[in-house]
Image (spheres, helix red, strand yellow):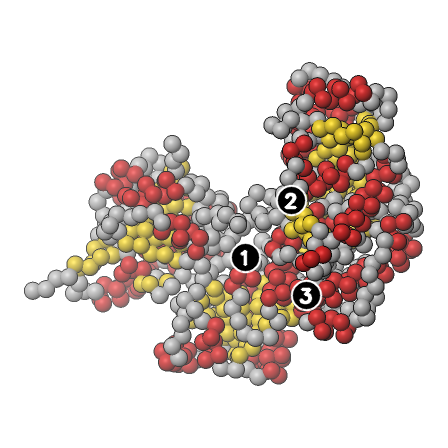
Amino acid sequence: MTDFSLMLPPGQTLEALAAQPDLPPWGSLQIDFAGALSRALMSAPAARAHPELMALGYWLRPGHMQPMLERLRQSHAQTALLPRGLVFHLAPGNVDTIFVYSWMLSLLCGNRSIVRLSSRASAGTDALLAVLGELLAQPAWQAIAQCVAFVRYEHDDAITARLSAACDMRVIWGGDATVNTVRALPLPPHATELCFPDKFSLTVLRASAVGALAPAALAALAKALVNDAFTFGQQACSSPRLVLWLGDEADTEAARTKLWPTVETAANAVAHGLGDAEHLNKDVFADLLAMDADVRIEPGRGLVRRIWLSQPAVHADTHCGGGLFHESRISALTDLLPLLSRRIQTVSHHGFAREELLQFARDAGPRGIDRMVPVGQALDFAPVWDGVNLWLAFTREIDIRA
Amino acid sequence: MSDQATVDCAPPAAPTTAMLDWPVYELPHAEKRRRLEAELSALTRHHAAHCEPYARVLQARGVALDQAFTLETLPWLPVRLFKHRLLSSVAPDQVFKVLTSSGTTGQSPSRIVLDRATASRQTTALARIMQRFVGAARRPMLIIDHPGVIKDRRSFSARGAGILGLANLGREHVYALNEDMTLNLAAVQAFCAQHAGKPKLLFGFTFMVWQHFVLALQAAGQTVNLDDAVLIHSGGWKKLQDIAVDASEFQARVSQVAGAVRVHNFYGMVEQTGSVFVACEHGHLHAPAFADVLVRDAQTGGSLPFGQRGVLQVLSGLPTSYPGHSLLTEDLGTVLGEDDCPCGRLGRYFQVHGRVAQAEVRGCSDTQVTPSP
């Protein structure tokens, strides 16, 4: 019988994990562990080569976790929140760090976890596992180690079914196909499930605001956009694939002419990891879109490849990532409405006041959009993800009346 | 779109078959360029007028159709488009057959639409090229495959099409393998005995020749006498490179088991059947008169000078039924020179280094491989 490979911690078994009691929700042990992991990540030489691991370390630091947990404790002071039990996380392959965010939130809530890592190894994941392995081997963190199993296996419904049958909650990160396949495998009747399917993200830039930027601010915006788009080869669900300019034609043309060369320069300055295969992919997907829609393939061929859409639209299936940007123009935020579906996740923005965005989100009735964040923060993980408050999703509440 | 395309250009002259009478390896580069650029420019306009998706692509790229294209400025399509779309420049009732590539596991196959005229030009071009290596007389032919691969003529796999294409060059065909890919030693020995001392033609796909002929003979402790034979093989070196077998090792091992056999590899693809690039005795792949090759930088798309490694672009004057006259492959290669190969053949000659390294697929749909339809 094929079985999973246990990555960490050594000697862990499914039986032991199932028999292990939960930890107290938001307990000090887990919070201390988050701090230790943060320090380990930020000082590990291997992690330094991966900006996303540094971002994870920064996110886990006590200065960030403590206030967040304090607010939670206060807002739930009169309720009894308990862990759900054993949580089975299926991690995606496109973003190396997601499995840690998912596991850590679950752990902080007191749950035990089985984490299935992507079967595709990556340098980022290897670096993470090395740091985690060292930490979980330390005596101080044995109670944490007893509450987790990191596993890896090739796609195998039998193994997924066995792990699903043992869990109280299942979390599926990674793609419509994965969600559909895993959903077909039963859970215990009481178990709950969270799914994070394919998403599409876009950027809205106010043309006049970009046009007015001084060189240093323009370079900062370009760098922020590059960070959002190129960190995971534009494969993260929150990486922008469509850039919409809000403004009139003249302002838009001026702003485009100004921004894109700066973005190209900024992209070339980062370790983007894109090679011939991605460049050839962009040719294929540009041509496929040209067959389907009225577009103009912009002549500049660099890391950044751009396609101007005569009509703003979401062409999610004709997009390969890797530095390909669909681009178009709108006159008002409400022009977004016809483009929105539940598939639209992050709208990163530049040149908008919070009130304006809030008013749009509340009053215009957008059918999609999970988050609106400034350009540069598209990849920042938050405990409210795709509209789900994970702090609450990873707990159960006992309704008490007296 | 079709209105626009016909306004942009006069009804394109139907490409002629005159090209097939061009001397295959004797056109000096200036003359070849002049002729080929005219043909390929006309083909570009022809396909723009008759294949709407192709015209849309050119329009999106802002390509002006009324220009005289050079080899370097001629628009190209990524070869992979034929895996995504059926691109045809002929009316449905003109379709003679649709070639499909065997395709890498998990990928959709390429589909190539042929009308009779294109299919016929492909056959003639292949014959013109191969005659330069095996002579004009049809030779007795040993096919290093099994007969089942061409039985179902409705599904023309690249493998079956390749065999049928080459089979035209031979006579008294014998298949060297059984249906289960084991060596039919008796058939091979009978072929050798019957045609001893006479010129013979062998054909097979590179890895099959290696695995099911060379290694099979060796494992059986047998040798056969195929002196005076020419072995034509194609189909990529990837699997052999993995086991560190290069062209000279391949030739040496063939000679060990089969005698004085002259080996010629060729580079070709189902998307440009017919105008193949055959390796000369110096191991250089040669562009025939009605085809050519360029190397481009994958990121900038710019054409690279001779001697630099990049992505191969292949040009062919043959296809009128589908817009495949200028294709950017996903193979890496280097053009070594033009008109100055020591073998004496004129035209560009080049090397193929293998496929572009596939990027790590980092889509959201990681945890499950989606089966392709």
Q: Is residue B65 left or right of residue A153?
A: right
Which quadrant, please, contains the N terminus of chain A?
Answer: top left
Q: Is residue A311 above or below residue B262?
A: below
For residue A213, which numbered disc appears in the image? none
Q: Position of residue B362 (x, y in %)?
A: 51, 52
**What residue do we see at 21% from left, 65% from top?**
A76
Secondary structure at numbered mark 2? loop
Marks 3 and 1 close (CB-CB < 8 Å): no
B350 on left or right of A213:
right
Provide the residue designation for mark 3: B52
Residue kind at label 3, given as amino acid type: Glu
In front: mark 2 or mark 1? 2
Specify few, some or many for label 3: CA neighbours under 10 Å numbering under 14, 14-19, or 20 or more.
some
Q: Which chain carries label 3?
A: B
Name the mark on residue B154. 2
Q: What residue type is labelled 2?
A: Arg
| Residue with the mark numbered 1 | A233
Q: Where is residue A107 in the image (x, y as percent from the top left)?
A: 30, 51
Q: Distance between the residues labelled 2 and 1?
A: 42 Å
Q: Nearer the viewer, residue B65 or B319?
A: B319
> Residue A64 in the image: x percent, y percent?
35, 62
Q: How far apart are marks 3 and 2 (CA)?
A: 27 Å
Q: Is residue A261 above or below residue A139?
A: below
The quadrant of the rendering that contains the C terminus of chain A is bottom left
View extreme (front): residue: B93
